[in-house]
Image: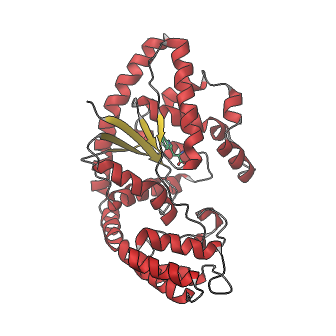
């Protein structure tokens, strides 16, 4: 049986944080090990253009994201790893998809509605057509499965519709049925406002970045919101326990859960333990990251190789599509 094709992408938005790691990259690393899958991972720099970055931000962030993903263990020998804009077929196919996608379908996307409220001064057309580019990313490689967090499921479902709309108009059964690959993803919350999702848009003290030195992790955790009484129900404490569950061993986790239940928990101790565990967990990552960032020519070689592999597939698909739509 031929391998199932997995495609996923991440926007380059600066240092990865623990929410990104548990929400996406950790899952990619598991999938990459699985022999049943052929994995393609992409840095979605064109998607990131819908935000408010400068050219220099963009240049820095693409390199940084490449270095961080490699440092976490994305293995360019096992997976095809590349930058979206290096393979121009993505935007070419996105244009074609724009012409089969009703505007109303794009206007009802939750992310579009959220972003246009958040970026009130920059509601650009890219925010609206974001999902047609994402559909192009996915369908160019005849992807079977797309590992994504819950917030992106709607886009994967729309991708399936876009494939169908294209098929109906141009070629029965050309694109297959794409499915989101759902795994249980821990929902990590902001340290300072633990009812909200962990996100850098609230400020750096809300997130633990993977590159944070242990003393920074401890300082941020010290400021993290807990409960006023030990044992009182609190989203902040729940969030810290969630992190402990994901990074610590079971005995330590159970000990704190027990203490929280019977009201003897000491938040200072929980924070110090967690800081230690997280600092240790990402120690190798921090070292690898520094090395990759110092070796730009190696990064460039890896990305050029990924570009070549992705291009081969993308070019073959686009050749067929140009023929199907009658422009060649
Ligand atoms: N929109 C995704 C996110 O913000 C990133 C992304 C771009 C993506 N293209 C993709 C994810 C294709 C999966 C497949 O998380």
Instruction: Please name whichever residue, 303 or 203, is drawn nearer the observer in this view of the structure.
Output: 203
Q: What's the image's color scheme?
A: secondary structure
Q: Position of residue 309 (x, y in %)?
A: 29, 36
- Quarter of the image with the N terminus is top left
Q: Quadrant of residue 66?
A: bottom left
Left or right: 112 in relation to 291: right
Residue 213 visible (yes or no)? no
Residue 11 against residue 102 in the figure, above or below: below
Front residue of this view, candidates 161 and 51:
161
Q: Is residue 116 above or below residue 188?
A: above
Q: Quadrant of residue 161?
A: top right
Percent coordinates x, y for residue 290 in the rendering = 34, 68
Position of residue 99 measured from the top left corner of the image (x, y, whole percent): 60, 21
Percent x, y of residue 139: 45, 30
Q: Could you tell me if residue 71 is visible in this image?
A: yes
Counting labels gives 0
In front of the other: 287 or 276: 276
Q: Identify the residue at horizontal 39%, vertical 60% (top origin).
A: 68
- Image position of 30 with respect to 197: above or below: above
Residue 109 vs 278, above or below: the answer is above
Quadrant holding the C terminus: top left
Q: What residue is at 46 percent from the left and 34 percent from the top?
A: 138
Q: Residue at x 45, y 77 (%)?
A: 253
């Amino acid at each position: 049986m031929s391998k199932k094709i997995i495609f996923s992408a991440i926007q380059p938005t600066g240092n990865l944080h623990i929410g990104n790691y548990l929400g996406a990259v950790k899952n990619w690393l598991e999938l990459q090990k699985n022999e049943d899958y052929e994995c393609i991972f992409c840095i979605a720099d064109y998607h990131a253009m819908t935000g408010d970055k400068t050219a220099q931000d963009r240049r820095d962030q693409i390199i940084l994201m490449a270095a961080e993903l490699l440092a976490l263990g994305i293995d360019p020998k096992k997976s095809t790893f590349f930058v979206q804009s290096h393979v121009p077929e993505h935007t070419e196919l996105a244009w074609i998809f724009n012409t089969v996608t009703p505007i109303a379908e794009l206007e009802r996307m939750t992310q579009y509605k959220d972003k246009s409220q958040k970026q009130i001064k920059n509601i650009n057309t890219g925010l609206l057509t974001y999902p047609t580019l994402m559909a192009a990313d996915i369908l160019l490689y005849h992807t079977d499965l797309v590992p994504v967090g819950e917030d992106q499921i709607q886009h994967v479902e729309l991708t399936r519709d876009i494939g169908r709309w294209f098929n109906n108009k141009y070629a029965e059964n050309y694109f297959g049925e794409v499915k989101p690959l759902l795994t249980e993803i821990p929902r990590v919350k902001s340290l300072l406002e633990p009812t909200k999702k962990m996100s850098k848009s609230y400020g750096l003290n809300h997130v633990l970045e993977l590159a944070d030195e242990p003393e920074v992790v401890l300082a941020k955790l010290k400021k993290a919101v807990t409960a006023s009484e030990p044992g009182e129900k609190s989203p902040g404490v729940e969030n810290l326990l969630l992190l402990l569950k994901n990074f610590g061993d079971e005995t330590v986790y159970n000990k704190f859960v027990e203490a929280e239940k019977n009201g003897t928990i000491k938040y200072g101790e929980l924070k110090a333990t967690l800081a230690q565990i997280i600092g240790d967990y990402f120690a190798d990552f921090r070292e690898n990251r520094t090395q990759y960032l110092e070796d730009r020519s190696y990064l460039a070689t890896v990305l050029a190789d990924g570009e070549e592999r992705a291009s081969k597939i993308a070019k073959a698909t686009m050749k067929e599509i140009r023929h199907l739509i009658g422009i060649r």
